Amino acid sequence: MTFPSSLELMAVVVSAVYGVLLASRKGMDVIGVFTVAFATAFGGGTLRDLFLDRNPLFWIKNAHYPVIVFGIAILSGLIVRHIGRIRPLLPLPDALGMALFTLTGTAYAMEAGTSAFVAVILGVITGTFGGVLADLLCNQIPTLFVPSPLNATCAFAGAWVYLGMLHFAAPERYALVAGLAMIVGLRLAAIRWNWTFPAVREAKEGGSPPG
């Protein structure tokens, strides 16, 4: 197993756990939990593979990935039973899964011969769009698209750190660790201090009516 493949497996596990926790907030049964966990773990990577015309899709090629997600969903009752203890840690699997998927997505895009900018964009899609699909399945506006602690921006910055270090001939494992630290650290800081972008709203014409 190569180092990027190891990262991908870790990303699947932590993203599936985050999907379980998200589904549990909505009181879903085990089918709903599996569906949300599946979308969280595989949604972004599936889009990446479709854009890059990679066949078969990564979770079909690695047939043990869906089995692992299924097992996590089956154990969701045990995970949720201890939700009170781990609630303060919920941002960690979110940030870690996003970081791992972002870097593997960026690496796969570069292997496919894309430009650096396109590779970063595909890395961000890999790292964030599983969460978008999970939010939609939970019948809520994706947090990626509304004022909320920085998300895609963290992935974008970390992917550039990874590529920048590779550009200057740093060993790949060091580049991966640096990118990982950037994404996770920036994401956790954004959650801690509520760093957000303002909402874009259409200006109202005419101002307020006279009193």
Image (cartoon, helix red, strand yellow):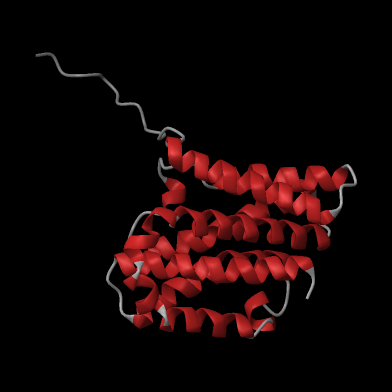
**Quadrant where the N terminus lies?**
bottom right
Left or right: 169 with respect to 204? right
Instruction: List the single residue furthest toward the left.
Output: 211
Residue 138 appears in the rendering: no
* Above/below status of 66 relative to 139: below
The one of 155 and 111 positioned closer to us in this rendering: 155
Find residue 162 and report its horizontal and vertical position in percent: 75, 48
Residue 14 appears in the rendering: yes
Find residue 68 and report its horizontal and vertical position in percent: 55, 81
Left or right: 52 with respect to 113? left
Q: Residue at the spot x=76%, y=59% of the render?
A: 107
* Above/below status of 33 relative to 14: below
Count of numbered badges drawn on the protein: 0
**Quadrant where the C terminus lies?**
top left
Instruction: List the single residue furthest toward the front.
Output: 85
Instruction: List the single residue furthest toward the right.
Output: 169
Instruction: List the single residue furthest toward the top.
Output: 210
Find residue 160 and report its horizontal and vertical position in percent: 72, 43
Left or right: 190 with respect to 136? right
* Above/below status of 126 relative to 169: below
Q: Residue at the spot x=49%, y=39% of the render?
A: 190
Find residue 180 and report its horizontal and vertical position in percent: 66, 51
